[in-house]
Amino acid sequence: MLKSALPIWTILLIFILMGCTEPKEAGKSGSIASPTAETTMQNSMPGSNEIPKLESASQLASRLVSSCWLELDSEISTVICMAYPKTSGSDLEWTYEDMIHSGITFEFQPYDSIPVIRVILRECIDSVCEEVESIINAPQREL
């Protein structure tokens, strides 16, 4: 499992470092940008138990990215999410079902009855916001 998770992280990090171009309207003064959506899928945790930390502005993403994974325990499952924001100091808000959390990371226990876990990350800079969605397929627990 570690060997298969490592290439996923490598590809994700390369993608973040390479970046993508922003929509033309997003940079114009006075324009109102509607949220954009991107879906990422993660079914296992990365090769390390450490959550990456942003240490400088050079580690900011060229577009908003979220990475979420599911840690399985014999009794408790935990979803861990990490944000890679576009702007340092922006407002980051996570949403899962009825849970709302602010910050660069979001950790929670998913509801047992939900087979697909959808986590939305919203980054706002002043009044301009962007959203990305992470989807995790939760394994069914045996009773």
Image (cartoon, rainbow, N blue to C red):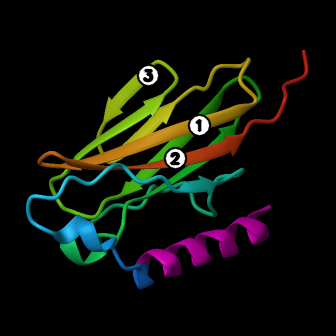
Residue drawn at x 31%, y 59% is: 85
Under circle 2, the secondary element is strand
Residue drawn at x 65%, y 41% is: 71
- Three-letter residue code for mark 2: Glu
Q: Is residue 8 left or right of residue 52?
A: right
Residue 2 among magenta residues? yes
Q: Is residue 119 left or right of residue 57?
A: right
- Above/below status of 55 relative to 128: below
- Three-letter residue code for mark 3: Met
- Three-letter residue code for mark 1: Arg
- Above/below status of 11 relative to 76: below
Question: Residue 1 is drawn in which quadrant?
Answer: bottom right
Name the front one of labels 3 and 2.
2
- Above/below status of 6 relative to 107: below
Residue, disc 1: 118
In the depicted view, which residue is nearer to us: 61 or 7?
A: 61
Residue numbers of the magenta segment: 1-16
- Provide residue 36's location: percent of width, then percent of height: 41, 54
Mark 1 → mark 3, Cα distance in angstroms: 12 Å
Question: Is there a contact, CB below 8 Å, between mark 2 and mark 1?
Answer: yes
Residue, disc 2: 133
The label on residue 99 is 3
